Amino acid sequence: MPFNSSGAALAHLTPRPVKDLYGSNYLSITGNDYNFTKQFLPEVYEKEVERFGNRTVAGFLKMVGAEMPMASDQVVWSEQGRIHIAYTGAVGTDVSAGLITFSEAHNINVADTIIVNKGGVTLKCYVTATPAATTINAIPYTAADISGLGADGVTGLNVFVYGSEYKKGSANVGNSKDADFTTFTNKPIILRDKYSVNGSDTASIGWVEVTTEAGTGGYLWYLKSEHEARLRFEDQLEMAMIEAEPVSSSQLDTALASTGNHGTQGLFSAIEERGLIYNNPDFGSTAAGEGLAEFDVVLQELDKQGAIEENMMFLNRGTSLAIDNMLATQNSYGTGGTSYGVFDNSEDMAINLGFSGFRRGSYDFYKSDWKYLNDGTTRGLIGDVQGVLVPAGTSTVYDQQLGKNIKRPFLHVRYRASEADDRRMKSWITGSVGGNYTSDEDAMNVHFLSERCLCVQAANNFILFKDTDGVTGD
């Protein structure tokens, strides 16, 4: 009885007496028989190609801030108010009587001397009466009344107190004025991530040689993915502190609030609420002096705030080059303002078209490219933020844990920590693979966790450069 067809009757390789290619003596790389050992193997590069360079974007907060522990669900700090008395947007309700009305209760007293301004008209006045908590009567020293500011109901008046004048033997002088301050709060959020690999995959042979952003390398197979998961989480720790938003009052009754998430205030949110916004800066204007004149607007605004001498600018590529061009036009070295700075201004050696720092007026500025704003998978994908100016100052506050006053950067991170648990950056492994036997799951799970928030103090000295017209570098 003949044998039925079986696996023994499958097609096989026909041996040949010479090393040559025939249709019956080699296995096709594109066929289904690639699972056999090949006579002719493809050329394989073992080294992984680093086509995106260093892919991490973290490092900004490490340069400009600090990290400190806290043991509460909320961090609270206070910031000093202005020392002088000033109001904007006042209304000349009855100009012939010198009646000025404010939108809030004022702190101006009878016998105070004030300056009232509207456009190009400025009057120095004496306060004769305060009929109500929101009104005063003022008589100019050099005019019969304040009609020079406009007709009855004129709006947009600017008023500030510059002194006082009393008669001899006067009594009942002024009112006591308490120091003004504002309290701010922020809450930490919990960030988590996980990398998981099953037990079978950990036994797979890895043949791709890799080099990591941390400087390590080798044949890491699945550990490469775990390492990238850690790098991604560390980047997100910083990105969350930059981009996070608190739940607004209008969202308190929505589905978001019902999840128990409250959000936290990040850098951009704090600057937009309490800081300075510069829309569409054109520092690289080709017109003579226009770029520098535009930058001088920044100085004029800093003068109105804390006037902190040293400031750091973290910019995207377009804005950074625009400032380089602005500064190059002011440089007398070489034709057309070209700088040879790093080579002792020797044109024969090499040229340097970049500037890392400069001084303008009474301010020092240190400029750096911010990779977060350039990377195609972060803010570089959107391009609406051109940069941020951060003051290089510190504030003195009382630390409850240390029991003394300490100096802290205006920008710093607070993370939850106690003697029992440090939640700055936790990592632990669960499962039954890799020598860690915590469950019957045939996998290795690497967990990451952090609980933190950002404190942006003196945000009035921070500037956010934004692109609202879609023109890069403008």
Image (cartoon, rainbow, N blue to C red):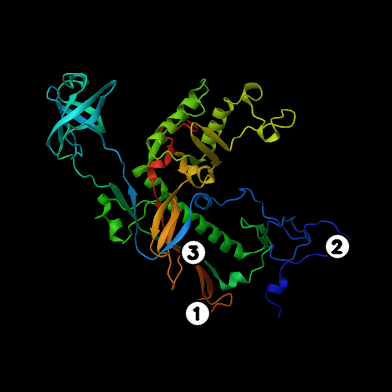
- Answer yes or no: do the residues labelled 2 and 1 have beta carbons within 8 Å? no
- Answer yes or no: do the residues labelled 1 and 3 have beta carbons within 8 Å? no
Residue at 68% across, 56% down: 30
Amino acid found under the numbered disc labelled 3: Met
Q: Which residue is mark 1?
A: 440
Alpha-carbon distance for marks 2 and 1?
Answer: 54 Å
Q: Is residue 297 above or below residue 246?
A: above
Residue 333 at x, y = what percent?
A: 65, 25
State left or right for residue 203 relative to residue 149.
Answer: right
- Which of disc 1 and disc 2 is earlier in sequence? 2
Residue 306 at x, y = what percent?
A: 40, 40
Across the whole image, how many numbered discs are drawn on residues?
A: 3
Residue 434 at x, y = what percent?
A: 58, 75
The label nearer to you, 3 versus 2, is 3
Amino acid found under the numbered disc labelled 2: Arg
Image quarter of residue 104:
top left
- Which of disc 2 and disc 3 is earlier in sequence? 2
Q: Which residue is mark 2?
A: 16
User: Is residue 149 at all visible to an observer of this figure?
Assistant: yes
Indicate which disc residue 425 carries.
3
